[in-house]
Image: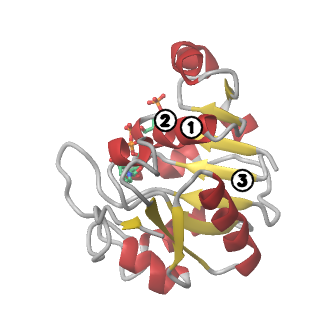
Amino acid sequence: MTIGIIGSGNIGTAFARRLASAGIKAAMSNSRGPESLKDLVRELGPLIKASTRDEAARADIVFIAVNWTKLPAALTGLPDWGGRIVIDANNPIEAPLFKPVNLQGQVSSEVVADLVPGAHVVKAFNHLRAEVLAGDPGADGGRRVLFYSGNDRAAKAEVAALIDRLGFAGIDLGSLAVGGKLAQFPGGPLPNQNLVKVG
Ligand SMILES: NC(=O)c1ccc[n+]([C@@H]2O[C@H](COP(=O)([O-])OP(=O)(O)OC[C@H]3O[C@@H](n4cnc5c(N)ncnc54)[C@H](OP(=O)(O)O)[C@@H]3O)[C@@H](O)[C@H]2O)c1
């Protein structure tokens, strides 16, 4: 099972840090090319390699963490998704104005799903601030909770297994329409709830 990351900012790096800590390989990319990631991947260790966006997008699981307005450009011109898994860690809001985007009644992951036709989208890794996500999920005497949602049962099971391997406690919130909405920022009740499952 290969993992690619599109977006090497706060959230992409937090995810990569957790993967590296758990001994899992990934290919990480951004808009500026692998050369610009040299220092970051050196810091993250040998399991995380710098790649092009296209290479990262060919993985079995593609983790996407890009500024909301840049998602269309970041996901344009990629090869067929063919049932592969996309983890949508994005929220429809952006610094510095933090003005909510008008999603015309859709949940944000449905908008992202339209940008990756044929992929099985699982929303996850979006409800905590990057610095919390980057930290040890076992640091507070239990396992830090991560929510996930999606419409494809098998894809959700794969992401649930990854969440578990990383040391988090995953909680399935159901479909994108239901769970995506609960975990979406802004609007949902779950963002920034830093919960720990004890026992
Ligand atoms: N920050 C948080 O605490 C937080 C928490 C939960 C969810 N989120 C969500 O996660 C997403 C990423 O947030 P962030 O804070 O990680 O943003 P960020 O630090 O600004 O990083 C964004 C990344 O997207 C990359 N990117 C932009 N356009 C691209 C393109 N055309 N092709 C490939 N990569 C491209 C950027 O590449 P370059 O480096 O080359 O510019 C950068 O690495 C957003 O949707 C945000 O709402 C953020």
Helix, strand or loop under label 3: strand
Q: Nearer the viewer, residue 196 or 2?
A: 196
Q: Nearer the viewer, mark 3 or mark 1?
A: 1
- Residue closer to the observer: 167 or 61: 167
* Horizontal relation, residue 19 to residue 124: left or right: right
Name the residue carrying label 2: 13
Under 8 Å from ligand 1: the CB of mark 2?
A: yes
Q: Secondary structure at mark 1?
A: helix
Decide which of 126, 96 is in the foreground and name it: 126
Amino acid type for the residue under numbered disc 1: Ala
Q: Toward the viewer: 155 or 55?
A: 155
Residue at horizontal 49 percent and vertical 47 percent from the top: 65
Instruction: Tell me if residue 27 comes above or below residue 176 in the rendering.
Output: above
Residue 173, percent from left and from top: 50, 81
Q: Is mark 3 within 8 Å of ligand 1?
A: no
Question: Quick check: can you spot residue 132?
Answer: yes
Label ID, residue 61: 3
Q: Secondary structure at mark 2?
A: helix
